[in-house]
Image (cartoon, grey):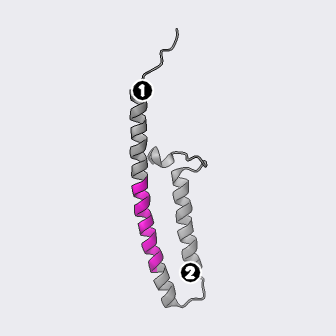
Amino acid sequence: MSVSQNMQRPNGLSELEILRTVTTGFAAFGNAVRASAISDAQKSRVLAELADASNRMMDATNAYLFALGEAHKAMDAKAANAPQLKIAD
């Protein structure tokens, strides 16, 4: 796990907790579709769309986490180059 994936957001959730929440939502929707009264053909069509949406969400999540990691590196580099305060003896 990288530092960026475990960064805390202002609402207190880490990036991984947010990803788990999204993943849980996809799984819950899939279970609801499977248990629904729609036909098997309709279930298959909806579940195929859900799988496609899930893949796009994972691509977006990967892009987001990469960008977040790059932003974190830039913040660390800026902090490392900041003037250091002298500590009194």
Residue 5 versus residue 26 in the image, above or below: above
Q: How dense is the environment of label 1, judged by Cα within 10 Å: few (below 14), some, or many (20 and up)?
A: few
> Identity of the amino acid at label 2?
Val
- Which of the two labelled residues, at mark 2 and mark 1, occupies the earlier sequence position? 2
Which residue is rendered at x = 50% and y = 47% of the image?
A: 6
Q: Which residue is mark 1?
A: 82
Q: Residue furthest top?
A: 89
Picture coordinates of residue 89, whole percent (x, y): 52, 8
Residues under numbered marks 2 and 1 in contact, where contact means CB atoms less than 8 Å apart: no
Magenta stretch: dominant SS? helix
Residue 32 versus residue 7 in the image, above or below: below
Residue 49 versus residue 63 in the image, above or below: below
> Identity of the amino acid at label 1?
Ala
Picture coordinates of residue 84, whole percent (x, y): 44, 21
Locate residue 43 relative to residue 73 in the image: left or right.
Answer: right
Which residue is rendered at x = 46% and y = 46% of the image?
A: 4
Q: SS at mark 2?
A: helix
Q: Which residue is mark 2?
A: 33
Which residue is rendered at x = 51% and y = 45% of the image?
A: 7
Between the residue at mark 2 and the residue at mark 1, the CA separation in whole angstroms equals: 54 Å
Q: SS at mark 1?
A: loop
Magenta span contains residue 62: yes
Picture coordinates of residue 5, whole percent (x, y): 47, 49
Picture coordinates of residue 11, whole percent (x, y): 61, 49
* Span shown in magenta: 48-64
Q: Closest to the observer: 68 or 20? A: 68
Which residue is rendered at x = 43% and y = 31% of the image?
A: 79
